[in-house]
Image (cartoon, rainbow, N blue to C red):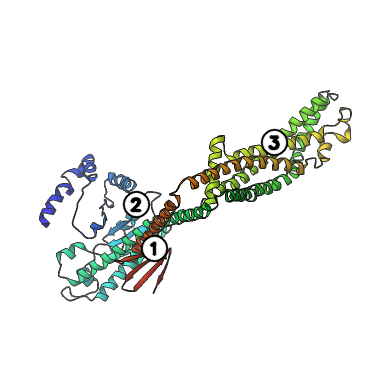
């Protein structure tokens, strides 16, 4: 059997003669993938072990590219770094950085996914290192001391100081092994002990990788089941409100939510922004004194001091270009940011019936109007602010033409005398009207959603039964997920589900374990 397997593998794995001197032939051979299936309990779990070309100073140049291409294409859950020199020096020191570079940049956490196997440890090696007669029995304590020595040499290797950010050496992810000696001397209890020690640590490491891989999946399923269950339970509470009086009450409740959670928040936020506009305009007007003097001189040289409308037009164009436009752009950015944050909260939350209705209403409104509510509000509010600011600035600088160039009221003096001509109270009234108008449209879409829900609940005789079935199904899925999560972390053969109390119960050597949602309690 062993000879047949060896002969079959040799056909595909043996290096072709002359390939060392033929780069193309070597690369063709190195790129050959050989699939070996073997009846093993470990492999029966779905585990795949892949032997990738290692590293050596005499490596063919193509091997580096092959390693990188493989890791980017296959992306394994973990990597076993095998090395022969217990001192972990020379070749091993050079091989480690090369392997790290071969891994994908966005690969999983290398600290957990790397296992070190020193592959030349056997009874004979331990006996020689500890000066014990090879024919004598080697105590397990001595084998353990040898394992600790090898691990200490690995951990103290200088190569890891430069890779400290990506590599973590841990005793749980290290083992000695010599598979060939284990196979060649099957009656040696020392070799059996070394191999069993290796397999135990290897399996625990593999299980840990599976936990890391599947924990997020189970958490997502649990959260989704919980979220949907809350939605269903919330809907159950609302079904009784679909009478005529109940529907009106529900509509009033949503109107109040819109007024409190959105209209009031937006108005408060805009009030803060608007309150700072006069001071910002004042600072902006005073920020270019030299440009103002140059502009004033150009007006004087033009000999058009009697053309008040023309001068006002040029003055406003100058002030907008140099100062006001910058302020309005900053204000527009702040308005857009605040509105987007407040409106965005509608889309982020759909944990219950109310949130789902509001989110669906927003989606329907934006689909119908071909633009987002946040954009509508931001554009309208920014336009209102710009109009108010422009009118207020014109009001201050629009003086009689006969006195425009009087020494005490030239442009520079006018800027110095600039009052708070911007009426922030009136501006906020206009903004509040804009906000109310947009949310009046939004409340119309909310009402349409409620009417649809009302019709469905009244017309569907099966609705209550469907809701009960859905709720039970999600709760059962939730419990099954807890059971699988328990099985992932604890090696129990039998896990019972208590659907009434949402508890997964497992029985093992340590006694029963109850898994409540994400917490564990042992009795």
Crowding at dot 2, Cα within 10 Å, few <14 / some 14-19 / many 20+, comes out as some
Q: Position of residue 195 (x, y in %)?
A: 23, 66
Q: Nearer the viewer, residue 497 or 201?
A: 497
Q: Which one is in front in this view, the residue at disc 2 or the one at disc 1?
A: 1
Can residue 456 be seen here? The reply is yes
Q: Quadrant of the C terminus?
A: bottom left
> Mark 2 or mark 1: which comes first in sequence?
2
Residue picked out by circle 3: 325
For the point 41% across and 58% down, which residue is it? Answer: 475
| Rendered image: mark on residue 98 | 2
Q: Nearer the viewer, residue 220 or 154?
A: 220
For the point 20% across and 48% down, which residue is it? Answer: 34
Measured in 3D between alpha carbons, the distance from the residue under mark 1 to the one under mark 3, in whole angstroms, is 64 Å
Residue picked out by circle 1: 499
> Mark 3 or mark 2: which comes first in sequence?
2
| Rendered image: mark on residue 379 | none
Q: Nearer the viewer, residue 360 or 164?
A: 360
Crowding at dot 3, Cα within 10 Å, few <14 / some 14-19 / many 20+, comes out as some
For the point 17% across and 73% down, which residue is it? Answer: 134
Measured in 3D between alpha carbons, the distance from the residue under mark 3 to the one under mark 2, in whole angstroms, is 56 Å
């Amino acid at each position: 059997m062993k000879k047949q397997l060896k002969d079959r593998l040799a056909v595909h794995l043996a290096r072709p003669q002359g390939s060392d001197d033929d780069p193309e032939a070597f690369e063709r051979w190195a790129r050959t993938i050989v699939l070996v299936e073997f009846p093993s309990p470990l492999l029966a779990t779905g585990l795949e072990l892949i032997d990738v070309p290692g590293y050596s100073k005499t490596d063919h140049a193509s091997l580096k590219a092959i390693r990188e291409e493989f890791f980017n294409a296959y992306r394994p859950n973990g990597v076993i770094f095998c090395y022969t020199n217990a001192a972990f020096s020379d070749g091993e020191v050079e091989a480690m950085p090369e392997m790290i570079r071969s891994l994908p940049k966005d690969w999983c956490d290398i600290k957990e996914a790397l296992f070190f196997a020193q592959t030349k440890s056997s009874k004979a090696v331990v006996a020689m290192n500890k000066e014990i007669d090879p024919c004598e029995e080697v105590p397990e304590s001595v084998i353990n001391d040898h394992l600790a020595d090898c691990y200490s040499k690995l951990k103290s290797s200088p190569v890891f100081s430069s890779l400290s950010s990506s590599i973590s050496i841990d005793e749980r992810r290290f083992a000695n092994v010599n598979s060939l000696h284990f196979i060649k001397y099957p009656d040696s209890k020392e070799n059996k002990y070394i191999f069993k020690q290796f397999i135990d640590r290897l399996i625990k490491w593999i299980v840990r990788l599976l936990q890391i891989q599947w924990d997020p999946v189970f958490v997502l399923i649990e959260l989704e089941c919980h979220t949907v269950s809350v939605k269903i339970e919330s809907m159950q509470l609302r079904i009784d409100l679909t009478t005529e009086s109940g529907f009106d009450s529900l509509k009033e409740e949503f109107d109040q939510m819109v007024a409190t959670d959105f209209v009031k928040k937006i108005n408060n936020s805009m009030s803060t922004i608007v309150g700072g506009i006069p001071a910002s305009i004042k600072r902006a007007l005073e920020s270019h004194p030299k440009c103002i003097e140059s502009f004033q001189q150009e007006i004087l040289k033009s000999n058009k001091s009697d053309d008040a409308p023309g001068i006002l037009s040029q003055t406003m164009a100058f002030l907008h270009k140099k100062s006001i436009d910058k302020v309005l752009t900053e204000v527009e950015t702040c308005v857009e940011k605040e509105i987007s944050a407040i409106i965005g909260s509608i889309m982020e939350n759909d944990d219950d019936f109310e949130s789902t209705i509001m989110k669906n209403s927003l989606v329907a409104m934006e689909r119908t109007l071909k633009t987002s509510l946040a954009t509508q509000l931001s554009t309208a509010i920014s336009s209102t602010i710009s109009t108010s600011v422009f009118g207020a600035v014109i009001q201050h600088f629009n003086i009689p033409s006969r006195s425009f160039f009087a020494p005490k009221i030239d442009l520079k003096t006018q800027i110095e005398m600039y009052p708070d001509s911007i009426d922030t109270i009136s501006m906020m009234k206009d903004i509040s009207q804009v906000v109310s108008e947009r949310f009046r449209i939004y409340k119309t879409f909310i009402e349409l959603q409620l009417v649809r829900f009302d019709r469905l609940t009244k017309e569907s005789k099966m609705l209550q039964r469907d809701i009960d079935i859905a709720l039970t199904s999600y709760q059962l899925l939730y419990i099954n997920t807890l059971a699988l999560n328990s099985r992932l972390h604890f090696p129990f053969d039998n896990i019972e589900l208590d659907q009434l109390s949402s508890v997964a119960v497992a029985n093992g050597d340590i006694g029963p374990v109850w898994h409540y949602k994400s917490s564990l309690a042992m009795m």
